[in-house]
Image (cartoon, rainbow, N blue to C red):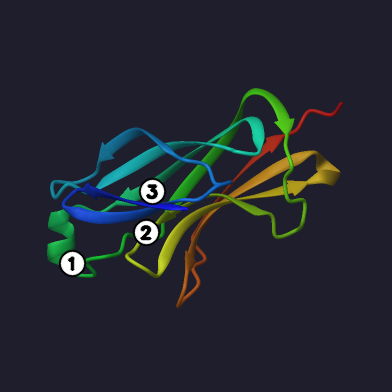
Amino acid sequence: MTIRAALLSGTILLGLSVPGLSVAQEIGRVGVDWVGNDIVIEAVPDPKVQGVTCHVAYFDRSLIDRLQQGNWFEDPSYSAIDCSQTGPITLGDIDESPSGEDVFSASRSLIFKSLKVTRIYDKANHTLVYLAHASELTQGSGKMSISTVQVPQN
């Protein structure tokens, strides 16, 4: 596991590169107000399912907003996800349990909160279900988004 720090919008975001988790690539950034808050859109390829890419959107607070609102080290939990087939689908060694497995995780606060994408395989319906959700150490969040990708039957 390697730890990397990036200076972004005047704040330090800590990210973990964990084997088995996908690395996101920022593909878009839309400004939403005069203080510099943005909605970031990232492409996240599923590391264990060839041919599936998810696009995750989330809110990124600016330095000005952090100074005005306080809560310096935390971003909101809101996120959206949409996944699609971007090539021939090949299932790797995926977790088929009802709890699924994490595909992607990014810190949304200094310690306590992260944005996660979890994959659950609905084998009976030949469907991959991708859930974007916040994971919080102290208090759970009901903020989530879901997307599905049909797995071709052989």
Mark 3–mark 2 Cα distance, whole angstroms, equals 10 Å
Relative to 125, say whether 1 is above or below.
below
Secondary structure state at the residue bearing disc 3: strand
Closer to the chain start, of discs 2 and 1, is 1
Which residue, given by chain and number where applicable, does mark 3 sit on? 58
Q: Are marks 3 and 1 in contact (CB under 8 Å)?
A: no
Identify which residue, 32 or 28, lies in the foreground: 28
Disc number for residue 108: 2
Residue 12: give x, y in percent of width and height: 24, 56
Mark 3–mark 1 Cα distance, whole angstroms, equals 18 Å
Amino acid type shown at disc 2: Arg
Q: Are marks 3 and 2 in contact (CB under 8 Å)?
A: yes
Q: Residues within 10 Å of mark 2 (few under 14, many from 20)?
A: many
Residue at screen point 58% across, 46% down: 20
Amino acid type shown at disc 1: Gln
Q: Are marks 2 and 1 in contact (CB under 8 Å)?
A: no
Say which of marks 2 and 1 sits in front. Answer: 2
Residue at screen point 47% across, 40% down: 23
Q: Residue furthest front?
A: 1
Say which of marks 3 and 2 sits in front. Answer: 2
Amino acid type shown at disc 3: Tyr
Secondary structure state at the residue bearing disc 1: helix
Q: How many marks?
A: 3
Residue at screen point 19% across, 52% down: 62
Disc number for residue 69: 1
Residue 11: give x, y in percent of width and height: 20, 55
Residue at screen point 85% across, 45% down: 124
